[in-house]
Amino acid sequence: MANPARKLESKALKLSRRERARLAQRLISSLDQEVDVHAEKLWLQEAERRLDELTSGKVAGIPAEKVIRKARSTLR
């Protein structure tokens, strides 16, 4: 009998791209159950700092369409 994980892998690879992406995300998330409180605090501080920069006018936002276009161009 084949390894159950290999059977599952074979079935998973037959899923649509979207279904595989969702499954991959859920599997990866399941590996990291611990919350690093220090890291969470640092991320929150960074997000607040960036928001303050945007709202004060210190930095200007870039439209999402422009960012996506540039990212796609870079990846080609």
Image: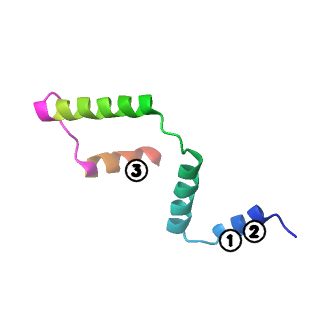
Amino acid identity at mark 1 = Lys
Q: Residues within 10 Å of mark 3 (few under 14, many from 20)?
A: few
Q: Which mark is residue 7?
A: 2
Q: Residues within 10 Å of mark 2 (few under 14, many from 20)?
A: few
Q: Is residue 43 visible?
A: yes
- Residue 21 image point, x, y percent: 52, 60
Q: Is residue 25 above or below residue 53?
A: below
Query: Does the CB distance between marks 1 and 3 fall below 8 Å?
Result: no
Residue most toward the right?
1
Rendering quarter of residue 24: bottom right
State the separation of the CA atoms marked 1 and 2.
6 Å
- Residue 42 image point, x, y percent: 37, 28
Q: Is residue 13 visible?
A: no
- Nearer to us of marks 2 and 3 is 2
Q: Is residue 23 above or below residue 58?
A: below
> Is residue 57 highlighted in magenta?
yes
Q: Which mark is residue 72?
A: 3
Q: Residues within 10 Å of mark 1 (few under 14, many from 20)?
A: few
Question: Badge 1 is on which residue?
Answer: 11
Q: Residue at x 27, y 48 (%)?
A: 66
Q: Quadrant of the N terminus?
A: bottom right
State the separation of the CA atoms marked 2 and 3.
35 Å
Lower position in the chain sequence, tag 2 or tag 3: 2
Rendering quarter of residue 51: top left
Q: How is the image coloured?
A: rainbow
Please state the extent of the stretch shown in magenta in the rendering: 55-64
In the image, 64: left or right of 32? left
Amino acid identity at mark 2 = Lys
Rendering quarter of residue 60: top left
> Is residue 24 highlighted in magenta?
no
Q: Is residue 61 above or below residue 15?
A: above
